[in-house]
Image (cartoon, rainbow, N blue to C red):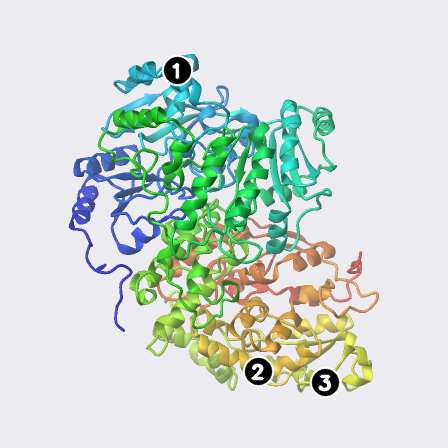
Amino acid sequence: MTTTHLFPGASTPADPAAADLAAALARAIDGEVDLAPRRRAEYASDASNYRVVPQVVALPRDADDLLAALATAREAGVPTTLRGAGTSVAGNAIGPGLVLDVSRHMNRILDVDVEARTARVQPGVILSTLQARVAGHGLRFGPDPSTSTRATFGGMIGNNACGPHAVAFGRTADNVLALDAVDGLGRRFTAGPGRAGHIPGLEDLVREHLALIRTEFGRFSRQVSGYSLEHLLPEHGADLARFLVGSEGTLATTLEATVRLVDVPPVRLTAAFGYADMPAAADAVVGILPHAPQAVEGLDARLVARVAAATGAVPPLPEGAGWLFVEVGGATVEEAEESLAALAADAGADSWRAVRDPQEAARLWAIRADGAGLSGRTPQNTEAWPGWEDAAVPPERLGAYLRDFDALMDRHGVTGQPFGHFGDGCIHVRLDIPLQVDGRPLREFMHDAAALVASHGGSLSGEHGDGRARSEMLPAMYSPEAIGLFKAVKHLFDPENLLNPGVLVDPDPLDANLRRPAAPATASAGFTLPHDHGDLAEALHRCTGVGKCRADAIGAGSGFMCPSYQATGDEKDVTRGRARVLQEALRHQRGLTSPEVRESLDLCLSCKACSADCPSGVDMAAYKSEVLHQTYKGRLRPMTHYSIGWLPRWLKVIGLAPRLVTAVMTPDWVQRLIVPLAGMDKRRRLPAFARPFRSSGVARARRADAPGRLGRDEGPAAGEGRDLSRLVVLWADSFSDGLEPEIPEAIVAVLEDAGLEVAVVAGDACCGVTWISTGQLDGAKRRLEHLLGVLGPWAVNGVPIVGVEPSCTAVLRGDLVELLPEDPRAHAVASATATLAEVLTGRSPVKVRDGWRVPDLSDVTAVVQPHCHQYSVMGYAADRELLGRAGATVTETAGCCGLAGNWGTEKGHYDVSVKVAENSLLPALREAPSGSVYLADGVSCRTQANDLAGVQGRHLAQLLRERLGAQGAQTPGE
């Protein structure tokens, strides 16, 4: 196969100076230094519209490493950009020279002083990590941006991050006490109150411009654009630390920070207030603020509709088309209730409701937290972009500004879903400005928007910084004298312009280095990608870079997305990093076949968790399958694509003599020979094979040919005497059929005990899941077309199809219609397919018999492993409800088991597979009480637990079958 690299000439550094810099860095620091094309692609973008490919990426291990890296770049005259989580939406975290990622290693909390209410942190510390550390003391860091589960303190300091609670606790600048920093000349200093003299000439510069600073700066709390020179005024203590916050890394680099912690009110209440529209809600803020709320957030029907479409439901809201979510605090419940009542009296709301249930309140706030990602697509399914996403005006001007902003969007023919921190006058919005071709529409809108916000006395940025998106427009809100003062300040700190160039001072044009116009439309060849108009480039640019896939990445119970990143902590192995590499690949002819792309995708488990958890709707499993399909189409594939990728085919053959095959393959020496030949890790074993379910007496007794035309409205006689209201068809997938036939047998027993008639399809029907995961999409389509011939007649007649293996059931519910969207049988099968729990809890058309009782599991303690594909496609709500009704005591794991079908068996994946299991599964099994059951419907999950912990897992159907007829059960409706 011809090798095509990610960048032209990527086999050697494109710039010899980059190789020299990398060599010098490798000598100077202990951390990683990387100038490989794949790594540079991962760091070429943040969460903004921009793409700037760095020469070198380095990951310093400590402050000494960071100082040495800065010195090395300074000596070479190479610009430097510091990066934390890379969630900047203004392009502040990308740069052309050296990018220094402090999130990987410099993430230690150095000290917490509870009495003094302070903490000392390295710049890579994630905000939620500190919040968890101090929560037991009733403390927190005040500002809390929506990206708090991945935002680092370095980034928050760079951008002066705020978040919903800034209305009560202030911005990051208001909560930073001291900074250990180094400027562009290599001068290290401690910034704090009265420390402006550390920078020669700074005090004189301030003294010469006192009147200018007092009139143009610090006019309202969210004036974040430009340099916050008001903090250097003598009446404000000449606070160098607070001044540096929000300077976007253009003046100094933070080595560590001392921050203030605040008391958390013991009692907090949330209320939702409804208004006629969002500007009316904004008008009401003026009456609310005197009551000292903890948070005041606003949104309107556009965002709520988007959330409802993405999640299926939102908590009930008061009547209206615009809403305020308000949080109040108090020392007691009575005090909080009094505060809320007084606030409500002045809120001017058409209707309102208090939300006292903490879980429901969390769901309300989640609407806001996911807004940045969800608003990346419009309700019309067009791409929407940041750039003008966090302008702010004084709160008393907010309603008027929003009305004018709606008119501005109308004039430019763009739409958006505004929301934001109404208590501070800050509005977030992404706009469907067409960026596929060039940046002219963006430029025109941005300049008009800048003039509008300036006319309301506002700020281009309210918390994200100006970056590459807005720095060009600073003259719209500052006088020429103020712009000149910015340049003079920059010269004092960084005269060679080596710190984050192109930002704030001498900025790059706002339409330079845009990522989207450089991505050519690329038709998909396997998946139809109907939600992205069949364009792989559009699908990949769903990734907005908000980094939810990095959230709480390291540590037990951190969630399903993204399992390989949870194990490695490497940007290479997170959904966003893979999306960036694939975006880069599309820029170059045949880039998808590059070795860099294969390396990027290698540790993707195809778990599909991103398809459910990513607020932007990224489905990396589908993109990986598509890329593998294009890469290997008509070419020789890796051995595992033929061995494990064709496993259902081999199971069908083995089913002719399963006991003989198992006996031959059981000896260790045979396993040691065959396992490596199959491309599997030698620490894995081939499974034991069983007599297929389709050959069992249970299956033969219930076997039924595909029905003719049936109809539930035609009565029992239409279906050969069957009562169609109680008829289901059991689909035993290849794995259940050939490896664990006792599971479909148990499902038959449970369904029949529930009063349902079970038909077993004649012949095999493979969903092709292993063909899909290995990118053999033509083969997958052939198997699915055969499956539709078997299951389609049942589905089109409205007969529910009960799946056994979650990954296969998920194919029928999801991948099937993306691979064969034109076949009406595919949509019928997708709609008809259900899990056992969905049938038993009434989530399918059939109903269990009157009086049927869920077996009593009140004496069962279980560790439950939701299968990733079930979690992502079908959801686990029905199983959770069924187990709750049965009275089981359940510990639900919070992440992937780590095997993920064929992925975890492949050579080179074992160690990461074990690390993924250590994130949640293995600790849960170790900590489970004696006698606990391990409940896992997925064959991969059961295999992983058996391989790594010697624990035998059971399918839900097996557990229920054991208890059929037990006393004390609950009816499904109780």
Residue under the image location 60 percent in, 34 percent down? 399
In three-dimensional space, the C-alpha distance between marks 2 and 3, rounded to whole angstroms, equals 22 Å
Q: As rendered, which of 200 and 132 lies closer to the eye?
A: 200
Upstream in the sequence, badge 3 or badge 1?
1
Tell me if mark 2 has few (under 14), some (14-19) or many (20+) residues whose alpha carbon lies within 10 angstroms of its own.
some
Mark 2 secondary-structure assignment = loop
Q: Which mark is residue 764?
A: 2
Viewer-nearest of discs 3 and 1:
1
Q: Is residue 969 left or right of residue 111?
A: right
Residue 502, horizontal then vertical, whole percent: 31, 39
Viewer-nearest of discs 1 and 2:
1
Residue 532, horizontal then vertical, whole percent: 49, 63
Q: Are the residues tagged 1 and 2 within 8 Å (C-beta)?
A: no
Residue 414, horizontal then vertical, whole percent: 52, 50
Mark 1 secondary-structure assignment = helix
The amino acid type, in three-letter code, at marker 2 is Asp
Q: As rendered, which of 910 and 931 lies closer to the eye?
A: 910
Residue under the image location 59 percent in, 80 percent down? 788
Q: Are the residues tagged 3 and 1 within 8 Å (C-beta)?
A: no
Q: Residue 69: name its quadrant.
A: top left
Upstream in the sequence, badge 2 or badge 3?
3
Q: Are the residues tagged 2 and 3 within 8 Å (C-beta)?
A: no
Q: Which residue is mark 3?
A: 709
Above/below status of 73 relative to 682: above
The amino acid type, in three-letter code, at marker 1 is Ala
Q: Which residue is mark 1?
A: 211
